[in-house]
Image: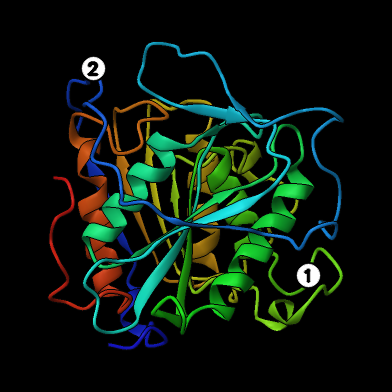
Amino acid sequence: MQIYQWAALLGVFLWIAPAASVHAQQPAPAQAAAPLTLPLWPAGKMPGRGPKEGAVEHALPSRGDHVTRITDINEPAIMVFKAPGATKPTPAVIICPGGGYGILCIDKEGTEVAAWLNSIGITGVLLKYRVPNNQDGAFQDIQRAVRLVRESAAKWNVAPGRVGVMGFSAGGHLCARLSTNSAQSAYPKIDGADEQTLRPDFAILVYPAYLAQVPGQLSAGLPVDATTPPTFLVHTEDDKAFVAGTKSYHAALQAATVPNGFFLCVEGGHGYGLRANGKISVWPKKCQQWLMKAGILPPEGRVNAGG
């Protein structure tokens, strides 16, 4: 099945897992191999604003939870983790860690996710977008990242028509914003990369934040319509602050007949990445199955996902 043959997916996949006891999070999964790291913007040509003057990218003090949190991103970049052993062009997924637009959980929602994507035959592209408190800068960064991946598709053995985005928490909001606002660039053209299309071919939103202003009403700036890319959603009912927004986004996808899947569990909380326990821990497997049904991965795709 080709990526554009979505008709079979219009009978949306919706899983609701029963409650399960939620224990301490699992140990950190394996990390991906060393990436190729590239700046997003040519020197002196980054649009918008960076962090406050004198701020230097750094990791915050440890909280004892084996999560690395970085902030003051003044040189946005992508880290390309190529799918190992691939003989044919692979899908690529731009990974957007969460952190409330203040920090990036760079391992739990970044490098660990890239390692999982590699295990199922996908090139992971970790986006270090501008933080803190710079949503417009972050939006420019994700637009540029999509264009750079498409421009370098042949060099990185990536299929240019299978470039998706994947976001966690605030990163999920960033991916939803791109998914619903890809008709117009947020910055003036800088070079040839900016001639590439902005619309991602698919999106994966894992416990996305900020999708609703009030329950049942999507946040301003998320105009879901028929051009919104096919989307897989993951959330739990006990994430009280944000699950209503995901439900609203799902309803909007349904109304616009956008192919989508929604894995909804009763318990699991927020911010687990690939380290969850209980029923929600199978979300990577459900996501992989959806990608296979969507034609993004081959039906016989490598089955190494958790769960």
Q: Quadrant of the C terminus?
A: top left
Q: State the CA–CA distance, disc 1 to disc 2.
A: 42 Å
Name the quarter where the N terminus is drawn: bottom left
Figure check: 117 above or below 28: below
Give the side of residue 243 with respect to residue 51, left or right. left
What element does badge 2 sit on?
loop
**Residue drawn at the location 29% of the way across and 43% of the way down:** 31
Q: Residue at x 23, y 40 (%)?
A: 30
Percent across and percent down for residue 52 are: 84, 30
Amino acid type, residue under disc 2 in the picture: Ala
Q: Where is residue 185, by image quadrant?
A: bottom right
The reply to whether residue 24 is visible in this rendering is: yes
Q: Earlier in the sequence, mark 1 or mark 2?
A: 2
Return the residue nearer the eye: 230 or 38.
38
- The location of residue 271, given as percent across then percent down, is 42, 30
Give the amino acid type for the residue marked by disc 1 in the picture.
Ser
Number of marks present in the image shown:
2
Q: Residue at x 33, y 88 (%)?
A: 2
Q: Where is mark 2, residue-wise?
A: 24
Q: Position of residue 207 (x, y in %)?
A: 44, 39
The residue indicated by pointer 1 is: 185
Q: Is residue 260 above or below residue 174?
A: below
Q: Is residue 286 above or below residue 197?
A: above
| Residue 14 seen by the camera | no
The residue lying at 67 percent from left, 64 percent from top is: 143
Q: Position of residue 136 (x, y in %)?
A: 78, 48
Element marked by disc 1: loop
